[in-house]
Amino acid sequence: MPVEFLGIAATNDGSETTARSGAAFDKEYTIRLARAHEEYGWDRVLFAYASGAPDPAPAAAYLASKLDSLQILLAHRPNVSYPTFAAKTFATLDQISDGRLTVHFITGGNDHEQRREGDTLGKDGRYARTREYIQLVKKIWTTTEPFDHEGEHYRFRDFVADVFPVQQPRPGVSFGGSSPAAYAAGGAEADIYCLWGEPLARTAEQIEAVKAAAAAAGRADVPRVQVAFRPIIAPTEELAWEKAHRTVGAIKARREQGLPRHHRGGAPENAGSQRLLAIAEQGERYDRALWTPTAAATGGAGNSNALVGTPETVAQALLDYYDLGVDILSARGYALLDDAIDFGRYVIPIVREEVAKRDAERATGAERSLAAVRA
């Protein structure tokens, strides 16, 4: 099966290790970073969402108007707009990008962050709302006749859109989470299910949970699986580990200087971050290259477990996840631009070559099996 690579569409050069050097929305940096992804073999980039941060939708439209092939994963929280409005926004963006849009629906794992924008629903209520929201967006994208809706969270009458996506029947839907409620919602509605990087055995367990949720929802198919990491690469193993320890030191120093406004300290409320911290408490190194101190240093904030080593080591670690059934690999470094270039130059080609070999071997094996049956 094909493999895809997802990077980050940051709107400024700040990260967990370095304060940004300019405005929150730096147009020139946004395009420069995106072009690096496009030029060095990445498939798509994520426009993330945070309260108070630049709105990802117009930022994505700006990028789409400047680049020709890079695909866009747009993060969206259902609490910030009505599904009728959001579906039109997404369809318009899919038109602007000539069909390069996937939408990543974020339920929200932190009550404080949600309340910053007026969302007072509890976690279970948010998942139910997200599921209803996704169902409505899908229907609006694919329905040409006016319809009414009377649901738990949304009600409207006689709505039909006048703008539709380029992609048929619709753009892809991406979703993430590590709780039973997340598996149920995403298993039912997602085309892509997103996980944070965990040890191989735990990732395999999560994949099975997603498959079970999809089956319970009556689906004949299952979502594709995406897993996210923070790669730390260098020409030798020794240099990579030195770089890894410097990175953790920089994260800790940055946090001591004060967290950025969109972060908040304290124990995480979401299951994904809780899992990352529990894994970090149990050990620093797992499998071929997974390293947890980066997650521990950030308090389990989002995609934060590292893969450390030479490009060959990191590529083989990613292939271990591919062999589990993961076909979208998300990666983001700490020096955003330089790391995107290095990963694209040195890691992506190795993974693509090895995946092509695996696919060829599978095809040959299938042909032999078919020939044996016919014989």
Image: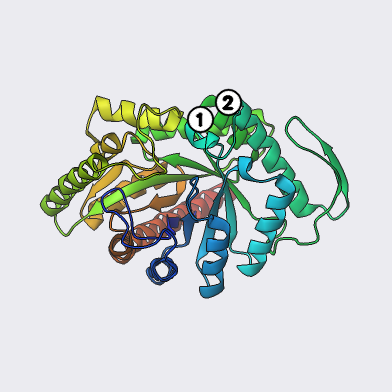
Q: Is residue 352 above or below residue 119?
A: below
- Position of residue 81 in the picture relative to residue 287 (left or right): right
Residue occupying image coordinates x 27% and y 34%? 296
Q: Is residue 291 above or below residue 67?
A: above
Residue occupying image coordinates x 81% and y 61%? 162
Numbered disc 1: secondary structure = helix
Residue to which mark 1 is pinned: 111
Question: Hey, what amino acid is under mark 1?
Answer: Asp
Residue 244 lies, in percent from the top left, at 19, 47
Residue to which mark 2 is pinned: 122
Numbered disc 2: secondary structure = loop
Q: Quadrant of residue 190?
A: top right
- Position of residue 151 in the picture relative to residue 240 (left or right): right
Residue 254 lies, in percent from the top left, at 24, 45
- Position of residue 32 in the picture relative to residue 104 (left or right): left
- Position of residue 253 in the picture relative to residue 189 (left or right): left
Question: Hey, what amino acid is under mark 2?
Answer: Gly
